[in-house]
Amino acid sequence: MSFHLDYLAILEGVIVCGVFGWLSLRMRMVDKSGLVAGFVVGSSVFIFPRDGWKWFTVILVFHLVAAQFTKYKYEAKRRRGFAQEKGGARAWQNVFANGGVAALLAIGEGLFPSDVFLAGFIGAVGTATADTLATEIGLLYPRDPRSIADLRKKVPPGTSGGVSPLGEFATLLGSFIIGLVAWLLGIGASPEWNFMRVMAIALISGFLGCTVDSMIGATVQEMFRCSICNKITESKKHCGEPSIYISGCRAIDNNLVNFISTGIGALVAVLVCLFL
């Protein structure tokens, strides 16, 4: 274990995460619980790795991009019954579901420095970004998506596991953004972390991690039907009323699916890093 307390990095991390957390709360990107969770995730990413500010910038880009596309055409999504609750403000469950794996990998890098933690971090954040953009942009696709478990079957918009050409494009876009940011920051400590390697790690892991997310969503994730508007939803509450359970495993909600898929994305990234 080679981690040594860097009190300056701790102070910088607390200040930077505190400022961005406060701004996120004011801009309604997160609620109060999301503020606390974001502070924990952001501080871990900033403090533990060497050049932690670069790691923090990568996950900050995810946070900003996710918030922007969540609010993009929000009213149109709301009218169709697909918008995130609370105006798109993320709660602690969503923050940890998307950033928990990345935070653990950043801590691992600080304790046991290795390229595998960096690759896994890029894969986890790339998957989270890909999945968020696939959802928020894919919802705007004008036709019914198809179930990833059976591409011959059309499903209502907003159904977990539904895929569309627009959503798949958004998946690659999210992965590309994270790979590009990581490369521009020079986040790798050696010349081996060139553009092609970083982008391969980000694109492959982001795409496969997001695909796993869709497969779990289409097969075992709990699903509900709104008692008011009759839409299929992954939310236990819709239109202000409790939703009616219709299928899936009651223990597997969307947040758990996101956590699992970012973990899969991280694992794929490590494998790409080791064999590329």
Image: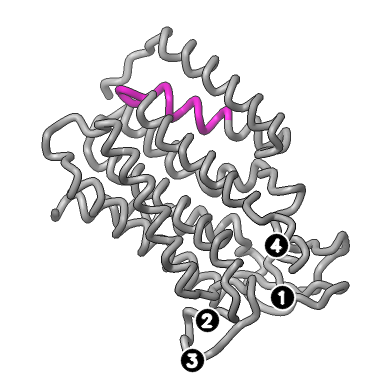
Q: Residue at x 42, y 46 (%)?
A: 125
Q: Which residue is mark 4?
A: 77
Q: Residue at x 20, y 49 (%)?
A: 273
**Amino acid marked by disc 3:** Arg
Label 3 environment density (alpha carbons within 10 Å; few <14, some 14–19, many ≥20): few
Q: Secondary structure at mark 3?
A: strand
Give residue 232's mark: 1
Give the mark nearer the N terminus: 1 vs 3: 3
Spatial distance from mark 2 to mark 3, Cα to Cα?
8 Å
Give the mark nearer the N terminus: 1 vs 4: 4
- Horizontal side, residue 50 vs residue 133: left or right: left
**Residue 137 locus on image (x, y percent):** 55, 61
Does residue 142 sit above or below 69 in this rendering?
below
Spatial distance from mark 1 to mark 3, Cα to Cα?
19 Å
Magenta region, residue range: 39-52
Predominant SS of the magenta segment: helix
- Horizontal side, residue 79 vs residue 148: left or right: right
Q: Which residue is mark 3?
A: 152
Give the mark nearer the N terminus: 2 vs 1: 2
Tag 1–tag 4 contact (CB < 8 Å): no
Label 2 environment density (alpha carbons within 10 Å; few <14, some 14–19, many ≥20): many
**Residue 151 locus on image (x, y percent):** 46, 86
**Amino acid marked by disc 1:** Ile
Q: Residue at x 40, y 36 (%)?
A: 58
Q: Residue at x 42, y 65 (%)?
A: 169
Does residue 249 sit above or below 190 in this rendering?
below
